[in-house]
Image (spheres, grey):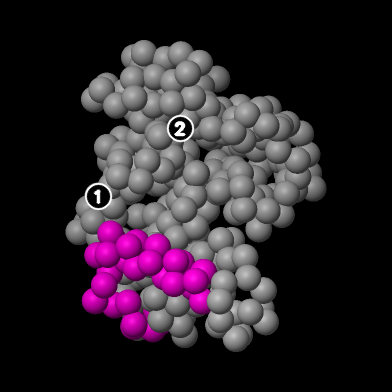
Amino acid sequence: MLDASQDGYITEDGRRIGGVVMEMKNITLRFGGVVAIKDISFDIREGEIRAIIGPNGAGKSSMLNVISGFYVPQEGEIWFRGERRPPMKPYEVARQGIARTFQNIALFEGMSVLDNVMTGRLTHMKSGLFQQALWKGKAEEEEVANREVVEHIIDFLEIQHIRKTPVARLPYGLKKRVELARALAAEPKLLLLDEPMAGMNVEEKEDMSRFILDVNDEFGTTIALIEHDMGVVMDLSDRVVVMDYGKKIGDGTPDEVRNNQEVIDAYLGVSHD
């Protein structure tokens, strides 16, 4: 069990997790007559790795899209860093300090790794298009500062050797790492990872798991992730929320969720009369 409080909790390995960063309150999302998310509430705390899991069609990606501003729920409230968040466009959410990766890789295939990662700095660029075209004064200083951040992330994720390679030439696992680098370039307060291990082999999963833990530990980044590999989820996560058919059926530590009979039934396809 967690030693929990309003200000945070202590993990089983002794790590200190802070207070609530994001709170989803009674979120309901409909598409016509289809209810994708039904009255779900949960929170994400500062410094933790929070997993959102469930069978296919459970509504996990829809929930991530609500958090990142791609969908606006018909009911419920989203609170971020102590303030109720009004409906926002994705770029406004990004400016708040929330970055994400996608289930299907969304990179600029014809651009180099370096240029792709640099696009993650767009929310930090203040100079106008004319200044950037001239590349003088403030625009030049800004470019140099942003480049330093990006180069640090490239080193951190061990992709120096491909920094000038067009993304289209990269194998799948490295593309996933480049997408993580681009998200980190935004220096997010909250990082959303949509199936970061999807399509990877065992070695690639081990590498990505290590980088996710390092990002959380060394950068102090709060992470919420969707993942189907239960071994990965149980190894990485501090807390897990479980969805099934748009409803929340479990919420707790990995051990608590693993032993939750309703969660077991959902994954095994068991029904009760």
* Membership of 36 in magenta stretch: no
For the point 71% across and 38% down, the residue is 85
At label 1, counting other C-alpha atoms closer than 10 Å, the crowd grade (few under 14, some 14-19, many 20 or more) is few
Residue 138 x, y percent position in the rendering: 57, 72
Quarter of the image containing the C terminus? top right
Residue 242 or residue 208, whichever sits in front: 208
The part of the chain drawn in magenta is 140-168
Location of residue 224 with respect to 146 vertically, above or below: above
Residue 7 or residue 239, whichever sits in front: 7
Q: Is residue 4 visible?
A: yes
Quarter of the image containing the N terminus? top left
Q: Amino acid at mark 2?
A: Glu
* Membership of 156 in magenta stretch: yes
First in sequence: mark 2 vs mark 1? 2
Which residue is tagged 1? 210
Q: Residue furthest left?
A: 203
Location of residue 127 with respect to 73 vertically, above or below: below
Residue 167 or residue 198, whichever sits in front: 167
For the point 51% across and 22% down, the residue is 272
Which residue is tagged 2? 46
Location of residue 161 with respect to 2 vertically, above or below: below
Q: Work out how far the residue at label 2 is from the one at label 1, CA to CA, in angstroms.
A: 20 Å
For the point 35% across and 46% down, the residue is 219
For the point 44% across and 40% down, the residue is 222
Q: Magenta: predominant secondary structure element?
A: helix
Q: Amino acid at mark 1?
A: Arg
Q: Is residue 266 visible?
A: no
Residue 152 x, y percent position in the rendering: 32, 62
Secondary structure of residue under mark 2: loop
Q: Residue furthest front?
A: 137
Secondary structure of residue under mark 1: helix
Residue 8 x, y percent position in the rendering: 44, 20
